[in-house]
Image: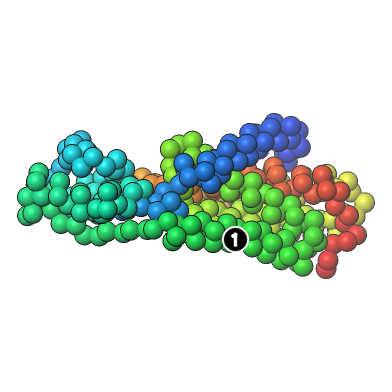
């Protein structure tokens, strides 16, 4: 079935979309502030323990929490009922010189006996490692912004690069805030999702920018605002198909991926929606705000 051509005036709702974006960015800045204060990060960036335990018998999440409470350690528990496992996470590495994994092991032995479980994996991340990870992640995002601007400045014009970088970071910042509000802590899975989203958003934006550049050369006498609106409409079919197809994959991962991949799949799903929104309503209007000069476009 062929999708008809579109003729929407996207600038009619510009005030609404700008307001929505300001709210999203404010939420994101709050989430980032909480992350750097140490309240919104997982053990990957704060240090701690992740202990994977496989049980011989099927246990409910309530029973597992009851056992864990006997240790006196505040564990964040991820239950994997299909695999009969649980992952015990805590930002503590030791208590009074005793390893948290040993404390949990003692409790499990008392309640389940040694034959009732197996500790399949113990991941300990010290404060030095977590600090390095946080620093490296920050540097990676800064360098990626510089890379985006330089690449698009070389391929198109510097204002395209700045607009694409702003739109991409708008998406990343918004998702950080939304994930924090939903109760998820920043960890390596969410960081991976953010980098994936940045790439997706940038690709979608470049497609629109390429059409804008092409149309500006064809319609040099046409108003910039009108050319941008025409270009967004001409690429809207491709944008819808790409976004819907990607959403099918991310939703399938969200539904069937299990608890371990839940934060990743939610971040990717939000990223597809917000990335599509920003490439239409944020990146392109920014070219007008920055007073793009069509004469400076590179061939």
| Residue situated in front as seen by the camera: 57 or 13 | 57
Say which residue appears at 83% left-offset and 68% top-offset.
299
Considering the numbered disc 1 on the image, is that residue within a helix, a strand or a loop? helix
| Residue situated in front as seen by the camera: 176 or 261 | 176
Q: In this view, does 210 lie to the left or right of 54?
A: right
Report the colour scheme. rainbow
Q: Is residue 150 left or right of residue 202?
A: right
Say which residue appears at 74% left-offset and 32% top-offset.
15
Query: Percent x, y for residue 97?
Result: 27, 53
Q: Is residue 48 left or right of residue 3?
A: left
| Residue situated in front as seen by the camera: 76 or 210 | 76
Say above or below: 44 vs 4.
below
Say which residue appears at 43% left-offset and 42% top-offset.
184
Q: Is residue 273 at all visible to an observer of this figure?
A: no
Residue under numbered circle 1 = 139
Quarter of image, res 142: bottom right
Query: Percent x, y for residue 123?
Result: 31, 59
Q: Is residue 186 left or right of residue 19?
A: left
Label 1, residues with CA under 10 Å away: few <14, some 14-19, many ≥20: few
Query: Percent x, y for residue 270?
Result: 51, 44
């Amino acid at each position: 079935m062929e999708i008809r051509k579109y003729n929407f005036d996207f600038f009619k709702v510009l005030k609404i979309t700008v307001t929505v974006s300001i709210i999203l960015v404010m939420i994101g800045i709050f989430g980032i502030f909480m992350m750097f204060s140490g309240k919104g990060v997982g053990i990957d960036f704060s240090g701690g323990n992740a202990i994977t335990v496989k049980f011989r018998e099927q246990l409910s999440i309530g029973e597992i929490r009851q056992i864990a409470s006997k240790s006196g350690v505040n564990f964040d528990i991820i239950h994997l009922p299909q695999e009969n496992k649980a992952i015990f996470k805590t930002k503590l590495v030791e208590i009074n010189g005793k390893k948290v994994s040993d404390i949990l092991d003692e409790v499990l032995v008392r309640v389940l006996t040694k034959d009732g479980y197996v500790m399949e994996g113990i991941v300990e991340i010290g404060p030095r490692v977590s600090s390095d990870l946080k620093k490296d992640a920050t540097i990676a995002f800064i360098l990626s912004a510089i890379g985006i601007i330089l690449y698009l400045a070389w391929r198109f014009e510097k204002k395209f690069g700045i607009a694409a970088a702003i739109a991409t970071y708008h998406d990343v910042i918004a998702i950080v805030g939304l994930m924090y509000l939903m109760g998820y802590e920043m960890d390596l899975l969410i960081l991976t999702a953010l980098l994936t989203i940045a790439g997706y958003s940038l690709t979608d934006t470049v497609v629109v920018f390429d059409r804008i550049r092409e149309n500006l050369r064809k319609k040099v006498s046409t108003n910039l605002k009108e050319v941008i609106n025409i270009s967004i409409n001409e690429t809207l079919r491709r944008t819808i198909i790409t976004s819907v197809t990607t959403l099918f994959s991310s939703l399938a991962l969200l539904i069937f991926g299990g608890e371990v991949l839940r934060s990743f799949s939610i971040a990717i799903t939000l990223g597809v929606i917000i990335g599509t929104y920003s490439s239409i309503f944020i990146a392109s209007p920014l070219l007008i705000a920055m007073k793009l000069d069509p004469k400076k476009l590179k061939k």
